[in-house]
Image (cartoon, helix red, strand yellow):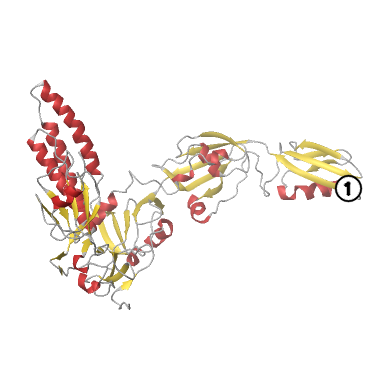
Amino acid sequence: MVVPAHAQSVGGSGLDAGTDVPQAADLLRGADTDTDDVLKPFGANLFNGGFSNDREDGLNPSYVVQPGDSVSVRIWGATKFNDKLTVDHQGNIFLPAVGPIQIAGTQNRDLNSRVTAAINTVFSDNVRVYTSLDGSQPVAVFVTGFVNNPGRFAGIPSNSALHFIDRAAGINPETGSYRNIQVKRNGEVLVELDLYSFLLNGVMPQVQYQDGDTIVVGARSSVVSVSGEISNPAMFEISESGFKGEALLSMALPAPSVSYVGVSGLRNGKPFSTYVPLQEFKGMLLHNGDAVHFRIDQHDQVIVVDVEGAHMGPSRFAVPRNTRLQELLDYIEVDPELADARSVSLKRKTIAVRQKAALEESLQRLEAKYLTASSQTDREASIRSQEATLIGQFVQRARSVEPNGRLVVASQGKVANIILQAGDTITIPGRSDSVLLSGEVLVSQAMLHEKGGRARDYISRSGGFTDQAQTDRIILVHANGEVSNGRNPMVRAGDEIIVLPKVPVKNLQLASTIVDILYKIAIAASVAVKL
């Protein structure tokens, strides 16, 4: 079958369908639900105790040897030596027959060549040298400012600032800055750190710490709260002025299909809110305290509709938004011998939501009626206690039912030509010669359809009703999704017969409510929930 341009099949797991453009106030209310009381600062997950477990003996190649470090020296050939030496306060190690060798200030990668050169001034031939920096003098670094637990923390010179801040229980999420961190030595600023450079680009300045150094975490400056369809919902620190929306995009990482952005905050002391296309947001100046919400909000000209049941060809179609059911049915190939095209029905997500809400409302009403019912005697109280258990179990089972959202569009062989919605599922049932029985019958089974047969005929051939069956009203679910009931209705091929249970409750109000719930479940999900 060749599908024209206005009805194209779609492969894969699905397609994002556009949603209606909301009112700006609705959008900004949605954005406000993810603000400072929920969102964490960008980078807060850095400090969860992981850096506190850094190896205490890790010395990188650029580490600079200093007094107190431990060095292993092995010499073989014309002379022999094998010992572990400590760098003295003058920065030397002492080798017999060679004398002191100045190694303080030498990088770890150059240590072996430095010692070898000194030895070669005495032993020029047949001498081999191997050196290893075994350990460094531990240091204690002060961490202060806006951290959760300021103090003095031990480490080694090659530890990173992240190690010491982690030992201080991390940056205070309400007051501390991730972009204004200073390392000070003897009161002078040695280096300034911006953790956003590390988080986004992996850049971290190398500092070899000395005993008494201080890491100062500054106060947080301007922030914006960012939520919505993004990879990094968080509070982001921004510069005091001139910070544009485009700079925020590289940090927040919005989903590719984001098309609109809502911004709310204060301008000149007055409330401000706007809802703009993504392209316009890139040039917008952001201010301290702004709440930014990214949203997939586009008028797609194409929606996706699924097809299930007895059909041939693709099971998913991309069609224009204003496509009607019969227009698409014209392009769905079926075998007329196998498919019952006159009993087409539709599953719609919005209807399933409404059915679920109606069921929940009835269950809440049932619980309220039961809780307000009073007992006059001990016997009545005992009965109510038994009913409480029964009703509680029933409510639990009923709440687990998921309505199918079926919309009846075919009646007496005619199909309503309704406009399709994104996410609709068209059901084309197969032709069936059977009748299915379920609920309060002795044997739940499928039976061959017999022309002119009625519901009780099939129930009788399945062993009859159970003792708990409600026999005065039998439900029929037809292939097109229609539901009918009666004491002994006529059955069509492909029907499902559902026998509901009795309601063993003395209170007539409660019984009436339960019966209502049973029928809603049977209609919405084609199942009979036992009491």
Q: Which residue is mark 1?
A: 127
As shown in the figure, which amino acid type bears the numbered disc 1? Answer: Val
Q: Nearer the viewer, residue 263 or 213?
A: 263
Residue 492 appears at what percent x and percent y?
A: 16, 60
Depicted 313 relative to depicted 108: above or below: below
Residue 281 appears at what percent x and percent y?
A: 33, 63
Q: Is residue 164 left or right of residue 18?
A: right
Q: Is residue 301 among the parts visible in the rendering? A: no
Dot 1 falls on a residue whose secondary structure is strand
**The C terminus, quarter of image:** top left
Residue 22 appears at what percent x and percent y?
A: 23, 60
Q: Is residue 490 among the parts visible in the rendering? A: yes
Residue shown at the point (21%, 31%) measured from the top left: 389
For residue 325, what is the image quadrant? bottom left
Q: Is residue 417 left or right of residue 77?
A: left
For residue 340, what is the image quadrant? bottom left
Instruction: Report crowding for label 1: few under 14, some 14 to 19, many 20 or more residues within 10 A (C-alpha).
Output: some
